[in-house]
Image (cartoon, helix red, strand yellow):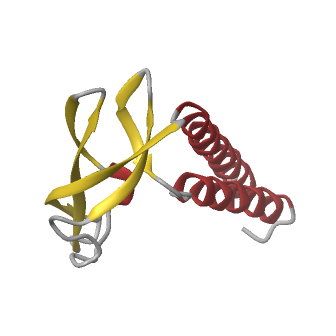
């Protein structure tokens, strides 16, 4: 039974990793324009894990203009537990989708790529370990 659960967990992780990477590459393909955005504030949220431990996450909210229209968006993929990573007034280069300018990411953000690789690697290790009886 443990072997089957390990294989299922591994396969699910591989599928999640593939989904994350496809999303990352789709964003890279559609976010073809770039501009400079200004951090106008830092939002924060507290996340509580299953042990009751709280982690505070900080998200920069940026403002930028495309074709004369102002946009204000949270850089969700740029969340950090470090409150000093971004400062109000700081400028960041973003990439956005010209058809949907509210869809953006920080230029050079490879979090989706690394996250996808991590999930795929973990999934493969879980499947192999389960088959070999090590998990």
Q: Is residue 113 above or below residue 46?
A: above
Measuring from the top left, give residue 75's x and y in whole percent. 31, 51
The residue lying furthest to the right in this view is: 132
Q: Is residue 75 above or below residue 87?
A: above
Taking the image as shown, residue 133 lies to the left or right of residue 77, namely right
Rendered residue at 68%/45% (across/down):
8
Q: Quadrant of residue 88?
A: bottom left
Rendered residue at 79%/65% (across/down):
129
Rendered residue at 64%/37% (across/down):
22
Measuring from the top left, give residue 66's x and y in whole percent. 31, 32
Q: Is residue 57 above or below residue 24?
A: below
Q: Nearer the viewer, residue 1 or 28?
A: 28
Measuring from the top left, give residue 120's x and y in whole percent. 70, 54
Q: Quadrant of the C terminus?
A: bottom right
Q: Nearer the viewer, residue 46 or 98?
A: 98
Q: Quadrant of residue 104?
A: top left
The residue lying furthest to the top in this view is: 99
Q: Nearer the viewer, residue 92 or 26?
A: 92
Number of disc labels: 0
Q: Nearer the viewer, residue 83 or 117?
A: 83
Q: Quadrant of residue 43?
A: bottom left
């Amino acid at each position: 039974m443990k072997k089957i659960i390990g294989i299922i967990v591994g396969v699910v992780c591989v599928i999640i990793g593939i989904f994350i990477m496809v999303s990352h590459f789709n964003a890279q393909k559609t976010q073809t324009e770039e501009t400079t955005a200004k951090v106008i504030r830092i939002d924060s949220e507290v996340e509580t894990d299953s042990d009751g431990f709280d982690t505070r996450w900080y998200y920069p909210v940026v403002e930028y203009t495309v074709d004369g229209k102002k946009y204000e968006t949270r850089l969700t993929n740029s969340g950090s537990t470090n409150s000093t990573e971004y400062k109000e007034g700081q400028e960041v280069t973003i990439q956005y989708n010209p058809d949907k300018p509210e869809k953006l990411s920080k230029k050079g953000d490879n979090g989706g790529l690394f996250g996808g690789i991590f999930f795929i690697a973990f999934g493969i290790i879980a499947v192999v370990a389960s088959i070999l009886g090590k998990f």
